[in-house]
Each structure stands twice: as C-alpha cells, then as structure tokens.
Amino acid sequence: MRLFAVVLATTVAATPLAAQQTIGQPAGNFRLTDVSGKNVSLADYRGRPVVIEWNNPGCPFVQKHYNSGNMQKTQAQARAGGAVWLTVNSSAPGKQGHMTPAEAQAFVASAKATPTNYLLDPKGVVGKGYGAKTTPHLYIVDGTGRLVYQGGIDDKPTSNASDIAGARNHVLAALGEMKAGKPVSVAETRPYGCSVKYAE
Amino acid sequence: MRLIHFVLMTLAMLLVLPAAAQAPGERHVAIELVPETAVPRAGGEVQLAFVSRPQPGWHGYWKNPGDAGVETTAAWTLPAGVTAEPIAYPVPHRLLIAGLMNYVYEGPFTQFVTLKLAAGLAAGTALPVSVKLDYLVCTNEVCVPESATLQTALTVGDGAVAPDRRAQFDEWRRALPKPLGSPATYAVENGLLRIAVPFPASADAADPYFFPLTDGVLDYAAPQTVTREGDTLLIETAAKTGRPARLEGVLATGGRGFAVAAAPGVVASASGGGAADLGTLFLALGGAVLGGLLLNIMPCVFPILSLKALSLAKGGGAGARGEAVAYTAGVVLVCLALGAALLALRAGGASVGWAFQLTDPRVIFVLLLLVTAIAFNLAGLFELAAPAAANRLAGEGRGGAFGTGALAAFVATPCTGPFMGAAMGTALLLPWWGALAVFGGLGLGLALPFLLIGFVPALRRALPKPGAWMATFRHVLSIPMFATALALAWVLGRQAGVDGMTLGLAAAALLAAGLWWTGVRQGRGRGAAWVPGAVAALLALAVTTTITRAPVQATEVAGGERFSEQRLAELQASGRPVFAYFTADWCVTCKVNEKAVIETADVRAALKGGEVATLVGDWTDGDPALGRFIERHNRAGVPLYLWYKPGSATPEVLPQLLTRAMLMDRAGGS
C-alpha cells in the first residue's frame, strides 16, 4: 500500500492532490486546458461557488441528463445564481467519450450546454485526484475553496429520463442552501452511472 | 471531415442509442423467467428464477455494483393476493477496471424473487405474473442500460415441484450466500476498517474477500488483507467515512458465500498492527534470529559455511573481522531483498496471508519435491554446483565474503520453506517495517556463527580440520530431511486424496531418478551433468497442474449417524427419541456447542443411557435438500437442534446456544 502511495504521489506531483476529497476540507487545486486551449485553474474562481461535473457523452447515464435537457437546465440555473460550472472529461485516448478539443467544442454546441469551461483530463490525473468514479459525478466547492458536496446529480439512480421529474436535484438544492447561508444538508451521496473511462 | 463525422455520430448516439438499446432482441443479456412450480399453494410461496446469460465480454451487476453501475430494479404487475420479495443475488465476482472496482457477473448467473400467496386464494385461480426488469450491462469499455419485460402464468394448486425442476433450482441456489449464523464486529481506526468475522479455525478459507452491501464504509478498490486468528477471520482494508449501525456484506471464500452483518464494536488488531505489539515484534525477531542460527546446520548452507569458515581460520585478526562483517552484510541484504519482494507482491493485491497458501495441495506438492531433492543431495546422490562457486569466491577478501554471504542466504531460502513457514506467517502480520526487521533478523541469525568466528580467534583455532567426517555428517542429516518429505506426502494425501498422494510420490520418484542420473554424470566428470535432473524436475513440476483438492467427505461425528429424512422417519417409527443437529465446518456457534456440550462425556453417556438416536446434518457444502429441511423449522441456516420425543411427529426446536442440562434432562426424561 505505502509503495503504491509513493508511486501515486510521484505521478500526481504536478498537481498537489490527495486520492480523494473530503467534505469540509479545502478541495485540491488543479490546472487543466479547456477546449479553446485556455489554462483553467480551480483557484482562478476563488470567491464563487464552483460546480465540477464529470462527463462522457457516450455514457447512457450522461445521455439521460443531456437528452432530457436536465443537465443544461441545471448548468444554466447554477450560473444564473453566480456559480461557476466546470465540466471535466477524464476519458483516456481510445476509450469511450474521449474527445479532441474541437470534438468537445462540437459536443458542447450540439448539446446546447453552457459550462463556464469544458476541461480535458485525458490522463485522468484530476479525475483520480478527486476520486471521480462515475459519469456523471458532481462536486461543489464553495467560495472559500472548501468541498461542500460530492455525489450524484440526483437521488434516482436510473438511466430512465422519466425519473428526473420526481427526483431531488442535489446540486441545485445545495447551491440554494449555500445562497441562503445555510449548511448543505445533503453533502455526500452515492454517484451513479458508467465508470469513468480512465487509462489502464 | 473527422469533426463532421464526430458531430453526426454524437447526435446519432444522443438521439438513437437509448431507443436502440431497448429494442427487443438487441439485449446483451438473455434472461429467462422460470418458476419453481407453476401451481403454488395458497398461503405458501414460490421462487422465481431469473436465469441470465450475458453475452461474452459483457457483465451484469450485483446489488451493490461497486464504484460505478446500478443494481437491478423490478417493477411487478401482480394479481390480488400475491406479493413479491426483494431480489436475491448470487455471490458476485470482482472486476477492477482502471482502478475502479466493479462487483459483477461475467458468466451466467441466476437471481431469485420469492412470491408470497395469500391464504384465501381459491384453488384453480389463474395468477398472471409480469415483471419489468431494469438493469445495467457493461463491457470493460461501454455500458448499456436495458429493460426486459417477462411473464409467467401460475395457477393456485398444491405446490408440487417436479423433481428435475427442483434439482435445477437447487443447483442455482448453491450460488446464493448462506447466513453465517454468528454476528460479526467492525471497527475503524486511523482510516483502517477491520471486520472480525466468526469463522472456525478448522474450516478452509481460500482467497477470502468481503463484498460490502452497505455503501460508504470501505473503499471498494482498496486491497483487502485477510488474516485468521483462532476462530476469527479478520478483514482489513481502507475505510471511508460511513459508520452504520449495521455493516452488511457477503464473505466469499472458495466458491462459497456467507451473508455477514457486522455491528460496531471492539476488534482486536492483527498481531503487530500497531505500537502496542512491540512485544510481538521482539518475540518474532528473537524467533527469526534463532531460526537463522538453526539454518546454519541446514543442508544447503552447511557446506558453504564450513568451507568459508575453514578458509577464514587460516587468516589473521583484522582480515577475518572485515570478512565476517562483509559476509554478514551479504546475508542480511539478500534476506531483506527477498522479504521486500514478498511484501511487494502482497501489496500488489494478493489478498491472503502466508498461512493460507499451505492449504493449497499444489504448494505442498512443490515442497515435497524440493525436500526430496534436498534429502537426496544430503544422502550424496548428486552434488549442488553451489560449493564450487563458493570455493571460487572464498579466497577473494571482503568482496568474496559478501558474495558468499549473499549466496548462502539465497541458497538457504528453500530450506526456510518447511521450517520457517510459521515465522514468515507472523512476519506478514506485522507492519511492513516490522516484517522487514524479522527478515533482517533471519539474516543476522544466519550470519551469527560466522561473525563469532571472525571476531573470536579462539573459535577459529578450535575449528576441526575438514575431512571425511563432513561427508558422513551430511549423509546423517539426510534422515530428518526424508522424514520431512514423508510428512509432506501425508499432508498431501489428506488434502488431495489417495490419487493426489500417489501422483506426488510418483513425481518424487521421477525426480529422484533424474537426480541419480545427474549424480552419475557428475561422478564421471561429464559436462552439463545437471541436464537429466533439470528435465526430471520440470516433468515432476508439470504434475502440479493435475493435483486437485479432494471433494469434502461428510465427516462422521462420534456417536452420530448422517441425517436423512428417511432415516429420521425410520428411527421415529422404532419409538426411539431422536436428537437431530445441523452443523457446518464454517459455523463457529455450531463448533462451540459441539465441543462444549454435545461431545462431552456426560452428555454422550446421557444420550446413550436414554437410548437416544443422534442424527447429524452437515451443511458445510450448503446441501439444498438439507437447506430446505432447515428452512421448514424457520431457520435460515445452522445451527439447528431438534429433539423428537417418541411418538411425536413435530420436534422441539432447542435454542441455538445449548447447555448440557438441556440435553441431559431430555435424555433422562424421555
């Protein structure tokens, strides 16, 4: 185990991350390139809530929320409330959902998605650093840089779009509570979906 | 072009895929709904089997899918008076993909649902049953959510089950986890989750793994370390933040599964888990040094050591000390390197401790061959090339001494197998630095006599001159080695049956013949004399693949007959009181009751005095017929104790914790 920890630490040395993030603790900082070639760092958005969404357009569970417009609606509502939305794609080259910057741009346009930035993480360094396991998998970092939510987008772990109507949207609920100055009541849930298609 | 193609593909994927995935006939899992009986009894129940066959390369998910995936959901359309229980899942497999753990079924699997019928249903009532299953099926690359709507038509009847259907269901049901019967305990400390599961020391536990049902308590992808201490099986793995009042899961071992529920509590750490166990560490260290010391008189080390020692005796003070230190360094470094390699292998995911391996007949077989070869070497049948190499190294100062030490330690390792197994097992239970200290201690012990010879001139002068006595001494040493081989053959016979033991002895004989030929060639000074021996060794090792564990025989318990319903009926008809008890090798409570109550002299005497017939049902293999009998007495598993008074068809179900008085009173009073 320790041996592995050392190997992992060496691999991840470029970005100081633990293998998993803890609610209430400062979220690990990272820097990734977005689809337009811009370098984006989590710390750039200090002072505002940041939602981080793990994405793989080929995954049926992602399609459930994009085809129904639920993810786009959540993005728009979060941004309208002053939050930053970072969509991260950790699919490795050759795996489902991997995209070049141009392909990712085309996906964002065709899906009418409105993330602040769509970030590419083909080596999976940030995904593994955050312990992102599924697509979708969502995280919220508050204005002080602390992690306040991690888990699924809602509480209906199915691929059926008709389940969205009756589901509790954990992300919007958490952002609403933060706005009202209340603690996030549901801070950790079980994410559901396809596994993140990391490099072996 | 590529971009346009991609956009089109993505759009197609977004729009078409969900529909395509659910089109009939396109599914990646063929599911068949089979009822155990089509004519269930009113007031009774019927099991429905979902017989699933994923396409090659595809896998379905367990109730807890692991890091990703979803469980199967069932939406039932049932007639009035019929209710469905939750889905029962067979024991899953592990599938680790890119660091994410999946709990899956990669081959055919069968899930069960029990339907309960209300008592008031009239015979002949048609019961159309329909269910829509939503489930996820994946390859290592892609996932597809699928739906299947399945129907079956039941009619209220007499509940009769066709024998072939029952046999088929019994086979499927073997894959379901059995209730373990005794509660487990868990504790979290410093990010480490420890679960103590009651499991008899005498029961085999090959490749154990804890599949958690409760989410958020442990890291699924983290390796699990399993150790056994007495009647406890201890699972250690990385904890997460959840601390539920009940941690549920399935302990899988050797193709079987046991449903485990653990409550928070105190769990003793594995030996040497922390600073509190420094005592254990020193004890293990002391044992290792002593063991290393003993290794000096072991067959493979003694010739090397004696040659080196005698060469040192000729030299003077400072040179001798330097060489002794260099030799010690060589020995200790090789021991540390071998130990580190072993620990690294273990960290790499081998989830078992050293002691488990000795339960594998193939390991015993390889040890048998090794010990046989060493014994024949000692007896003088052939020579190892090692002494010649050591000789060459002997004269060349500190570098040579270091090399000799490294060689001695390396050649000694086979000898550590049979004799040091226990010490190594202890070492692997220690934290890594403790384990390395023990391996280092083994090296130090091995080097100790040489170190003394180097630093104490009087010892050097007292050394006997090399001569013919050494050969005789070696031949004498072969006797205990042959005895060891004999013991190993016996163990092999216990584990793999008469056939396995015969194969082992045949392989040993083949090896001996090869080694004899090598010895003959060596005697004539031929080149490449080792060839026949090596060929024979390879052939003998090839036999390993044919060694399999013998099927478990039903163990006869003193004073007890094997249980069968037929025998029970016969005994009841004869008018004798009958005590029937149901047990399994993996059931701690059962074993405690047997040792402390049933098998005690006074209880046996009382049973004998009261002419009580004792029947024993062994559920170790999860025999479904026995399982059904146990279930009829409202128990999900063992232990179960039944007392049949003469003339009474319904037994008295005794408590799971027996006392001697319970049995003696009944035996005396009946």
Image (cartoon, coloured by chain):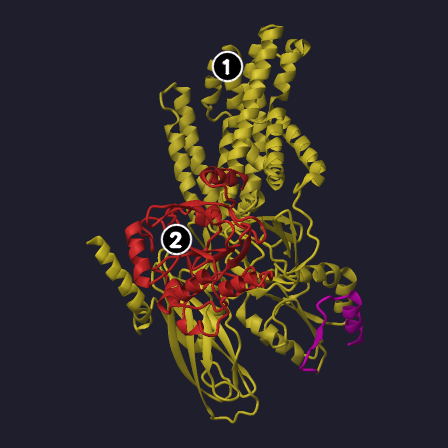
Horizontal and vertical percent position of residue A195? 42, 57
Q: Nearer the viewer, residue B242 or B344?
A: B242
Q: Chain of mark 1?
A: B
Q: In the orientation shown, which residue stands out farthest toward the top?
A: B316
Of the residues shown, which amino acid type is indicated by label 2? Asn
Q: Chain of mark 2?
A: A
Chain A drawn colour = red
Q: Which residue is mark 1?
A: B400
Query: Mark 2 and mark 1, same subunit?
Result: no
Q: Nearer the viewer, residue B505 or A38?
A: A38
Q: Residue at coordinates 61% horizontally, 51% vertically from top-left? A: B193
Q: Residue at coordinates 22% horizontally, 53% vertically from top-left? A: B2
Q: Nearer the viewer, residue A162 or B198?
A: A162
Q: Residues within 10 Å of mark 1 (few under 14, many from 20)?
A: many
The image quarter containing residue A187 is bottom right
Image side of residue B92 versus residue B597, left or right: left
Q: Which residues are magenta?
A: B648-670
The image quarter containing residue B104 is bottom left
Mark 2 in CB contact with mark 1 (< 8 angstroms)? no
Q: Is residue A102 visible?
A: yes
Horizontal and vertical percent position of residue B361? 51, 47
Q: What label does residue B604 carry, if any?
A: none
Q: Is residue B465 visible?
A: no
Q: Which residue is mark 2?
A: A117
Chain B drawn colour = yellow
